[in-house]
Image (cartoon, grey):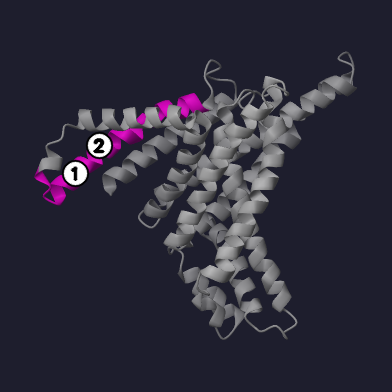
Amino acid sequence: MRAGLGTAITACIVCIATLLASGFGAFPGFTDTTLILGYSLVLVVGLADFVGFAARGFHRIILSLLPKEVLWRGLVLTGVAGAYMLGLPFAFGAFLSGGLLVLWRLLYPVSDAALLLPGVVALVIWRGTARRALARHHVWRAAVLRRESWLFRLLTGRLTAHLSGIVAGLLAVTALAEFALTASPASGLAALGVIAVTGVVLPLVARLFAGHLTARLLAPALVPPLAWALGLAATGYLFWRGWYVEPIPPEADAASLAAALEMAQAALPARDHLAAWLLALPRSLETAGWVLAGQGADFAFAPIGFILVLSYHALIGGALVRFTLDCACALLPGGADEG
């Protein structure tokens, strides 16, 4: 576990540094996706080390004798083959987003160093949101304003684009981090299914509209309506599972709302910092919804509880779709272009 945590921390530091540096104009010859896929070899090599340690620890002699070079080269070959067979946007978007959430679930109870993983999620969503907003604003500015006007130089759109990216990143990463920690295995598989479907739909729609839209604006034009459509579908699916399939959370039967919230917080790893407080927000939203909805149909607040539970699943579904799209669209034409 220590070897896996160290590898994940190293890869997160490299990814965060890459995203920040490229955001300020570094590495102009490479997309974010290309750089992160290159740095993901760090994880692959670390995984080979981890398998070797685990094999010796569990006395799997044959597995421990497998050369690390053969193991990590085989993993790389499998990843590359899968990427080209399934399509790069699907492979990168689905595997990166799903992999980060799984690593977060495994590593955060062990160490606070795992907080670097949500940092990568927030950066990906921030950059995707900001770059699409900038591309759309540049089209509007070029069509409406004269280049010699001082308004053309003033209204760059950077401030609002980056603010919207920061807000979207914070909302999404808070919801995803809490969900990944507290979801049941069945709900986790359902979330991975949403990620996979999103990663498959994006390249299909992009291929359909590639002959109609300019390459630079392909991602800025397609991602917002796709995010709404797939987000609504994901919300309906996750809410249906949570309301009708999953067992009612035990905190719904608490004697009071305060007691239910206390029980809900106990399900999270015990921490005393800002990140723990942020993780408690979506957890409290869902818990309050279940408590109010469980009061009975004749209770005045029962509809409010229904709305709160629905809002929680809408937050999760929208965040899953948005993160996968932001990961995947970086490989589409215009996905990494600020315009």
Q: Quadrant of residue 22?
A: top right
Q: Residues within 10 Å of mark 2 (few under 14, many from 20)?
A: many
Quadrant for the C terminus, please.
top right
What numbered label is drawn on residue 28? Answer: none
Tag 2: amino acid: Ala
Q: Which residue is mark 2?
A: 48
Residue 50 sits inside the magenta stretch: yes
Q: Quadrant of residue 289?
A: bottom right
Whether residue 16 sits left or right of residue 297 in the image: it is: left
Q: Quadrant of residue 298?
A: bottom right
Characterize the magenta stretch by its predominant secondary structure: helix
Whether residue 288 sits left or right of residue 186 in the image: it is: right
**Residue ID at (46%, 56%):** 188
Q: Earlier in the sequence, mark 1 or mark 2?
A: 2
Tag 1: amino acid: Phe
Above or below, 297 relative to 314: below
**Residue ID at (11%, 50%):** 59
For label 2, the SS is helix
* Callout 1 touching callout 2 (CB < 8 Å): no
Q: How many dots with numbers? A: 2
Is residue 138 shown to the viewer in this render? yes
Q: Which residue is mark 1?
A: 53
Q: Position of residue 133 (x, y in %)?
A: 72, 33
**Residue ID at (54%, 83%):** 254
Q: Position of residue 134 (x, y in %)?
A: 72, 29
Give the magenta range: 33-61
Q: Position of residue 62 (x, y in %)?
A: 11, 41
Tell which residue pokes out farthest to the front in this image.
Answer: 208
Q: Residues within 10 Å of mark 1 (few under 14, many from 20)?
A: some
Q: Position of residue 18 (x, y in %)?
A: 49, 28
Tell which residue pokes out farthest to the top in this image.
Answer: 148
Is residue 283 shown to the viewer in this render? no
